[in-house]
Image (cartoon, rainbow, N blue to C red):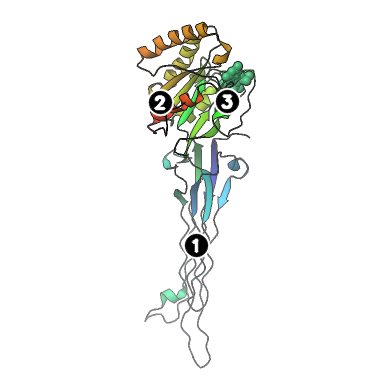
Amino acid sequence: MQFIDQARIAVKAGRGGDGIVTFRREKYVPAGGPSGGDGGRGGDVLLVADANLQTLLDFKYKRLFAAIEGRRGGPNRRTGASGDHLVIKVPCGTQVRDARTAILLGDLTDPGEELLVALGGRGGLGNAHYLSNRNRAPEKFTEGRDGEDWLLQLELKLLAEVGIIGLPNAGKSTLIAVLSAARPKIADYPFTTLVPNLGVVRRPSGDGTVFADIPGLIAGAARGAGLGHDFLRHIERTRLLVHLLDSSADDVLADLQVVERELSAYGHGLDQRPRLVVLSKIELLGPSELASKLKILNRHVAAQGGQPVLAISAAAAMNLAELLAVVWQQLGIASASPPG
Ligand SMILES: Nc1nc2c(ncn2[C@@H]2O[C@H](COP(=O)(O)OP(=O)(O)OP(=O)(O)O)[C@@H](O)[C@H]2O)c(=O)[nH]1
Ligand SMILES: [Mg+2]
């Protein structure tokens, strides 16, 4: 699946229908009065957040959205039908800006949340409106007004509560695959993940929490190196970062620090975000090697006031319940029972 997170679309609301000029023609009524009805209102354009969408991919192919025009007025003072509103579905987490000024128009986060982006034109007035004592047979009417049109910039920030970060090949995608129903590509080479993967992990309460697995970060990522930079944006809104480290690396502390530097270089508060440092692939290590790597990491993390480093294996399903228990605790979600 291609991941599109920015799109530019043009929206146009419906024009109002014109008012019309008619006169009553009835048997036995010598001079029927003006009876032209008003035009109907043009349809509005609305955006609505839809929980079933994950990307802005649809907008790659369709960029013009126009609502229906109001109908002309009818005889016998009948008002024309209003144009239907056009409702455009966008994924939750879509921010909407006026493309010309970059002014933020709205932020559609909750499912069902709506934003009116273009107001339909008012209908014109029919000649029945202009009846007066001075003019018993007005020929005057007005045209419908144009609907608003706007150029919009859409930007999707994935709404995940937990972001899984780390160097390429650390095992991030493997972890989200064992914790959730997400089935990202996993392979033994760096930069396997090219687009963020979202997975819903069941909490003890049965509800889901969205985890995001993002492409690997490398030195210079915050300045644009590798693939990670574009995607750091997606973890801006997470509440917790799970920082995975490949335990088979020679210098796990250096690996940890590379990513830490990128988080602080990127800014936006990412280096202040609560974080769990997690050593992965531990079934590959002997007990003494594991203990010494944990010791080195813990010394560094404790100096920052961080949580103790966790040791897991996604492949061998080791300590995953313990990891989740700490995640729920960090998010303030109570565990149903202590992990066993
Ligand atoms: N032995 C072992 N191998 C693992 C474990 N977790 C992941 N791997 C392997 O590590 C390699 C990389 O795993 P991925 O999950 O693709 O790593 P990633 O961090 O998503 O990598 P990028 O997407 O490239 O950043 C794959 O060959 C996995 O099979 C583990 O717990 N133990
Ligand atoms: Mg990956």
In the image, ligand 2 is in what quadrant?
top right
Q: Mark 1 or 2 closer to N-term?
A: 1
The residue nearer to you, when weighing 85 against 91, is 91
Across and down, in percent, residue 188 comes to: 64, 18
- The answer for how far apart the CA atoms under marks 3 and 1 are is 52 Å
Q: What element carries label 2?
A: loop
Question: Is the C-beta separation of discs 3 and 1 under 8 Å?
Answer: no
Above or below for 198 versus 118:
above
Across and down, in percent, residue 128 comes to: 44, 76
Which amino acid, mark 2? His
Above or below for 158 versus 272:
below
Q: What element carries label 3?
A: helix
Residue 23 lies left or right of residue 192; in this view the side is: left
The residue nearer to you, when weighing 312 against 219, is 312
Question: Is the C-beta separation of discs 3 and 2 under 8 Å?
Answer: no
Whether the residue carrying mark 3 lies under 8 Å from ligand 2 is answered with yes
The residue nearer to you, when weighing 199 against 293, is 293
The residue beneath circle 3 is 173
Residue occupying the point 55% across, 59% down: 68
Q: Mark 3 or 2 closer to N-term?
A: 3
Of badges 1 and 2, the one in the foreground is 2
Which amino acid, mark 3? Ser
Q: Mark 3 or 1 closer to N-term?
A: 1
The residue beneath circle 1 is 16
Residue occupying the point 51% across, 24% down: 320
- The answer for how far apart the CA atoms under marks 1 and 2 are is 45 Å
